[in-house]
Structures are given as C-alpha cells and as structure tokens.
Image: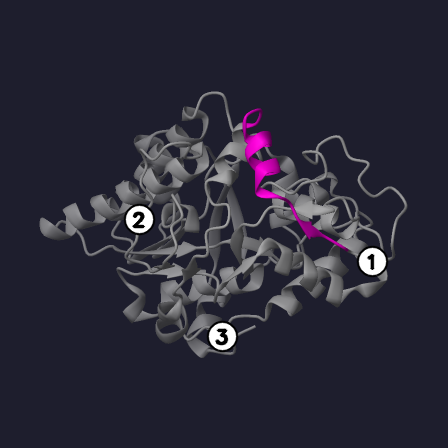
Amino acid sequence: RDPDAKKCTFLRNAIAGTASKNDDNKDTILLSSKAKTHLTLLKADLLDGEEFWDTEIFAKAKPDFVLHTASPYFGREPEDPQEYIRPAVEGTRSVLKAAIKHDVQRVVVTSSVASIYYPAREKTYTPDDWTIVDAPKISAYAKSKTLAERDAWNIIQEQQATMTSKTELSTIHPMFTIGPTLYTKEDEAADSFESASICIKIMKGKFPMVPHIKMGISDVRDVASAHILALSTPEASGKRFIMSPKTLWFEEITQIFSECKPELCIHSKVAPSFLIHAMALFSHNVARASKSLNIDYNVDSSDTEKILGLKFTPAATSVTDMMGNMVALGVAPDSATSDKGDDSNNSGGCLIS
C-alpha cells in the first residue's frame, strides 16, 4: 500500500513470529501464500514467563525490531478481569524485558484507543490522554490494555534512565477496525471476530436500533502500515499513534454501510436513551456502553499523519471492502435478507459493542 523504500526494505527482511500453542487455525492463516516466504513461526504463550521469551524466542530469533500485537480478547466481559489483565501485562513485560536484554532497536506495541479515552468526556482526545483504570464500570479489556501499555512505557523509561539499553518504543491505537481479511471460505473463524460479527449483523439488518455513541473507524490496512512505519520512522520513537481521523456516531456508521451497498436495504434508528439505561440494569456490556451514551468526543490523530506520513483510508472505502470480503467469504448477504432481527445474541436488536 505504501511505496516508501524504507518500508519495503523492512517487508523484504526475514521475519520470525510467534503464534499461540493452541491455535493452529491462525498458524494456517499466517503462513498463507501472502506471508510464508517471509515468515517463520515459533510457538509461544503470553504467560510463558520472562525466561522463556528470553531464551526460547529472542535468543533464537535474534530480532532487530519487534511488533508486539498479542493481547487477549474473547468478545465478552470475563467473570474474572484477570483473564485479560494478567496475560496482557505479563506478556508485554516479558517481551519488553527480552527486547532490552537482546538490544532490539525498537518495539512497536499494539495498544488500543481503549487506553486513551475511558471514561469518555466531551473533548478531543490526544496521545497525551490516558484511560483512568479505576473508573467505574471500566471494561476488563480497557483496563488490560491500559495497564499493559503503562508497564511498557515504564520499562522503557527505566532502562533509558539507567542507560542499560537503547531500545525504543512506539504504540499503535486502533479503534473500530474493519477492512478486508486474510481469511478464506475454508476458515471457520472468518465470521467469529468482533468486527466481522458487528459488520455482518449490520449487513443483515439485525440492528433496527443503535445507541447514540461514538467510535472511530480504523482501516485494518492502515493499522498494519502504521506498525511498519512506526518501526522505520526515526521520529516515531516515544510516540503513541491514534488510528482514526475522527469519530462518528454509530448511526452514521450504519448509514455508510447503507450507502455503500443500498441493495441491502439497511435502516437503523437511534435507540432512546431510556431504553439503553433500562437494558444496562441487566447487562454489564450495556452498562459499560451507556457510560459513553450521548457523549460527543473526538480524537486528534494528527501525529499519525505528520510523523508516519500515513494517509487514512476513507471510511466508505473501508466499509465497502469489508462488506465485499464478507460476501465473498459467504458469511454475509449480497442483497436484503428476510431474517432481520432474528438473532438471539443481538441484545434485542440494539447494537452494543
């Protein structure tokens, strides 16, 4: 997507990656024809510990640069928040400490806007903002991403203060990430990740009502490009990069879906606030989402454009390509369906993410 020579050099280099010990499906996708000539996979787990990551991964791979993208998320709020927090924090700590020990030049960590804007207020959020981890109703995911990223910056700052290493750090902060996938029709997980699930339900007309909340769209290709650019751009060191040019009300997002594929006859109305608050009494996810209800916030991603030189993909392009991919995979309709609203997992036909 980007002809920048420095980026192309990075992509031509041999890459060693890690994959979960219990997820052969992702191994198959990662080793697809688009990547297998550059990629070698090593089995690892976020909770394998600092010694394992030091001796079994970094000592063998000998990386100059590291992308740390792994963090647990299962599409639900866990009963025990530590299901998300412990692997996120301990995994990040293990990777950062091993990177420092092995003189890695730069680490880029996939964080999230969830580490920046919770609880949402009517303001423009910048990379200088941080989520308040002890805020009421904060999700386990937001807390895990915030604590893990905080730990990463602390580790880097400590080693720089003591001059023990010159390892640098940058972080990437996606929002609602959509766009074409690497899945094929043979992949059972093609429609199981959260972005796909939401997009498919929008395409099927499963959300006749949506809450009045805001979110930004991140194109998955922009997110991937930003990781590589953050590795290769000297000025990216020490920076946090928000991956959406602006926020949109969710009814605006569903309208983009409707305009990009009018034959689907997508129609969504804004759910009354009292309905969301009533549902919040019975659902932790809805209660969490209700905290952002009617709050008109935005994001400042100017550093992403100025420092990385990234031009954001228009939202309509991201939506069009995502819908086309879902149709091609056979998990979403190409025209209007007759089973709108017939979904036991759609919170009564009201979108809550």
3 or 1: tag closer to the N-terminus: 1
Residue occupying the point 28% across, 43% down: 150
> At numbered mark 3, what does the secondary structure look like: helix, strand or loop?
loop
**Residue picked out by circle 2:** 130
Q: CA distance from mark 3 to mark 1?
A: 31 Å
Report x, y in % for residue 185. Answer: 79, 48
> At numbered mark 2, what does the secondary structure look like: helix, strand or loop?
loop
Residue 95 visible, this angle: no
**Residue picked out by circle 3:** 311
Amino acid, disc 2: Trp
Q: Is residue 224 above or below residue 339?
A: below
User: Mark 3 Cα within 10 Å, few/some/many (few <14, many 20+)?
Assistant: few
Please tell me whether mark 3 or mark 1 is closer to you in this view.
Answer: 1
Q: Quadrant of the C terminus?
A: top right
- Asked whether 271 falls inside the magenta stretch, the response is yes
Q: Quadrant of the N terminus?
A: bottom right
**Residue picked out by circle 1:** 265
Q: Is residue 215 left or right of residue 265?
A: left
Please give the range of residues in magenta: 267-283
Report x, y in % for residue 236. Answer: 31, 66
Amino acid, disc 1: Cys
Report x, y in % for residue 72. Answer: 49, 35
Q: Which coloring applies here? A: one colour
The residue nearer to you, when weighing 182 against 143, is 143
1 or 2: tag closer to the N-terminus: 2
Q: CA distance from mark 1 to mark 2?
A: 39 Å
Residue 335 visible, this angle: yes
Q: Is residue 316 above or below residue 177?
A: below
Residue occupying the point 60% across, 49% down: 30
Q: Is residue 193 above or below residue 226?
A: above
Q: Which mark is residue 174?
A: none
Residues under numbered marks 3 and 2 in contact, where contact means CB atoms less than 8 Å apart: no
